[in-house]
Amino acid sequence: MSKYILHYFGANGRGAIPRAMLTYAKANWTNDIIKKEDWPKIKKSELCEYEFLPVLEVDGKKYCESIAIDSYLAEKFNLMGKNPDENYQIFNLLGTFDDFNVQFRPYRLCEDESKKPELKQKAVDRLKFFIAKFEKKYVELGKGKYFLGDKLTLADFYIGVALIGFCQTVNEFPFKEVGPNLGELVERLKKNELKEFYEKYFFQ
């Protein structure tokens, strides 16, 4: 059995999806939490090829860049789609991660309390926009047990983990308003496939 080490900060962010997949697959893995005070040194070390986290080690071999790590683990654990069209849908979702960050970063980093409400509203509006888009896609794909029908895929880890992380950032979970079917999918995942991850590794 391969030995995995995931290096990431003590937060959800880009480390949440690989943590969730490693947990679901019951892999032999170590959750290496990088402390903020250690980051400047680690950033310049051989561990970080591009000076970013997460970094995944597999039997001593290093893998970096979050989408590459996510897709690598999905392939290893049979969590990719059944055909190129389904894989497109998966990467379509993953591609929105940076779109979220562009809107959410100003709110997260803002230290001027007078500006935070406006920045938060912009982030919430964007969150609702994407959830509505994901809801429409999910319904068009058949509104099945999982996002892509009858097979658990990386798409479900994005919806059930990364998207919830963005909701948590602004303390808004607008599924009833703009994504009721998607909200039901999230709840099913949290009670079943993602249950252990939420109990052990999701940062509240």
Image (cartoon, rainbow, N blue to C red):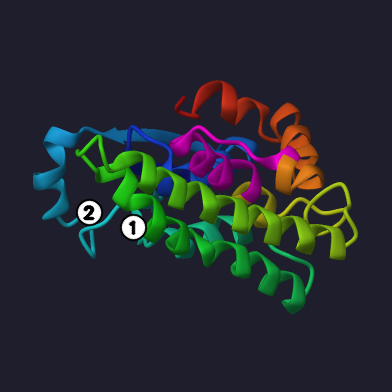
Badges 2 and 1: C-beta atoms under 8 Å apart?
yes
Nearer to us in this view, 140 or 123: 123
Nearer to us in this view, 62 or 2: 62
Q: In which quarter of the image is residue 139?
A: bottom right
Query: Label 2 belongs to which residue?
Result: 47
Nearer to us in this view, 71 or 172: 172
Which residue: 55% across, 36% down?
Answer: 172
Mark 2 element type: loop
When the figure is inspected, residue 102 is found, relative to residue 162, above or below; the finding is below
- Badge 1: residue crowd in 10 Å (few <14, some 14–19, many ≥20): some
Residue 62's disc number: 1
Relative image position of residue 80 (x, y in whole percent): 69, 62
Question: Which region of the structure is painted magenta?
Answer: 159-176
> Does the magenta run of residues contain 65?
no
In the displayed orientation, state which residue is furthest to the bottom.
Answer: 84
The reply to whether residue 74 is visible in this rendering is: yes
Position of 113 with respect to 136 (left or right) is left
Nearer to us in this view, 187 or 130: 130
Which residue: 62% across, 26% down?
Answer: 196
Q: In which quarter of the image is residue 147?
A: bottom right
Q: Which image quarter is the N terminus in?
A: top right
In the displayed orientation, state which residue is furthest to the top.
Answer: 199
Three-letter amino acid code of the residue under disc 1: Lys
> Does the magenta run of residues contain 161?
yes
| C-alpha gap between disc 2 and disc 1 | 7 Å
Which residue: 52% across, 23% down?
Answer: 200
